[in-house]
Image (cartoon, coloured by chain):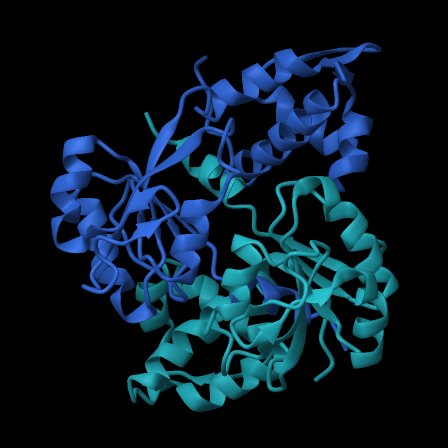
Chain colours: A cyan, B blue
Amino acid sequence: MALKNIPDIVVGRLPLYLRALQRMHDANQTVTSSQDLAARLGISAAQIRKDLSQFGEFGKQGTGYDIEYLMNQLSQILKVNRVWDIAVVGAGDIGSAVARYQGFTDRGYRITMIFDSNPNKIGTKVGSFVVQDAAHMVAAIQKAGVKVAMIAVPAANAQAVADELVKAGVQAILNYAPLSINVPEGVRVQHADPVTLLQRMTYYLD
Amino acid sequence: MALKNIPDIVVGRLPLYLRALQRMHDANQTVTSSQDLAARLGISAAQIRKDLSQFGEFGKQGTGYDIEYLMNQLSQILKVNRVWDIAVVGAGDIGSAVARYQGFTDRGYRITMIFDSNPNKIGTKVGSFVVQDAAHMVAAIQKAGVKVAMIAVPAANAQAVADELVKAGVQAILNYAPLSINVPEGVRVQHADPVTLLQRMTYYLD
């Protein structure tokens, strides 16, 4: 499918649509509508139809969307009709929690390695992984061809880790460290610092 | 300060500005500029000036921004010049990790309670907290007047937990569960499902 230049904000909503469809599918629902999705997601039905129409004709007027078909299409668009290996950097509380997290299964990702620079952590187990020495990180990631990583190290080390990940060929970084990291053009970063998300809400509270 | 109706996307950038200023302040820097912030954040200097100008006149042409002053102003705007208590629901890997997370200090938040419904977890310790029985959650949150909560329970239970939190008076929810939760008007939700953030990036990868 040759894609036009889709706004990133639209791309950002597709995972929400896919997630809702997967939950409907798990509940043995086979058909849905933009209204049904809208009620679950708090996004207007018109917006959902408009977003999906940018990628193709997925629904029929009056009969709605075939859930399995739309799931498959969105999985393909989001490139999660395959499994991406993930390297986790930092075996502290957050890194360990994501390494143990069961929620990646069937959603396009699997953690395959975890690194730390603390000699007390190297060689210990986190879930089913042995924590590897961060000194060998670039070589290990390059060798495995891993393109996706999560940073869960203290703020002071996060930019240096990001630089190493980029050197190793990583193209997408989920950053849990509480600072904005700089990466070259072509590398994607999403920030998952819980405090910025909280502050975005308390602005509205009394 | 009487505020105009500020777009939520602008509000969402203020925590990034505050975070960058706090890091500069920690490094004993006293003055900054929109260009300096832009280089750290990957947001254009013009955008930063425009965002900040919606809230007041914080900088002087030619001399830039006084970091401490701007930090104080942004803290006040984001209402984090106080400390918000947080209730965490779910004492699994993610809930335990955020309960132990040290990164809330000086940023406007502190975890004060954690709940779970699993009898094997109730009464055990997570960091410095004793896991409380979720059956008493509504009463405990109401009594303490807690307005901010994090949901870290399995998807199947997340909506029911959200409904209880709303009943208890919670007005801001950070949701780690992998689904969109519905809340009444006036209650804020931010979603922190790592998979949706990852999918938003792999869309762009080959």
The correct choice, above or below, for B44 with respect to B22 in the image is below
Residue A80 in percent (x, y) is at 60, 80
For this rendering, which residue is in front, A16 or B80? B80
Q: Is any part of residue A53 visible from this angle?
A: yes
Left or right of A116, for residue B1:
left
Indicate the quadrant containing the N terminus of chain B: top left, top right, bottom left or bottom right.
top left
The answer to whether any part of residue A14 appears in the image is no
Query: In percent of the image, x 75 and y 75: which residue is there?
Result: A146
At 48% across and 26% down in the image, what residue appears? B78
What residue appears at the point 64 percent right and 26 percent down from the top-left corner?
B22
Choose between B42 and B193: the one closer to the eye. Answer: B193
Percent x, y of residue A134: 76, 61
Camera-side residue of A120 and A152: A120
Residue A128 image point, x, y percent: 54, 77
Q: Is residue B55 above or below residue A19?
A: above
Residue B35 placement, left or right of B54: right
Coordinates of residue A3 in the picture (x, y in percent): 71, 76
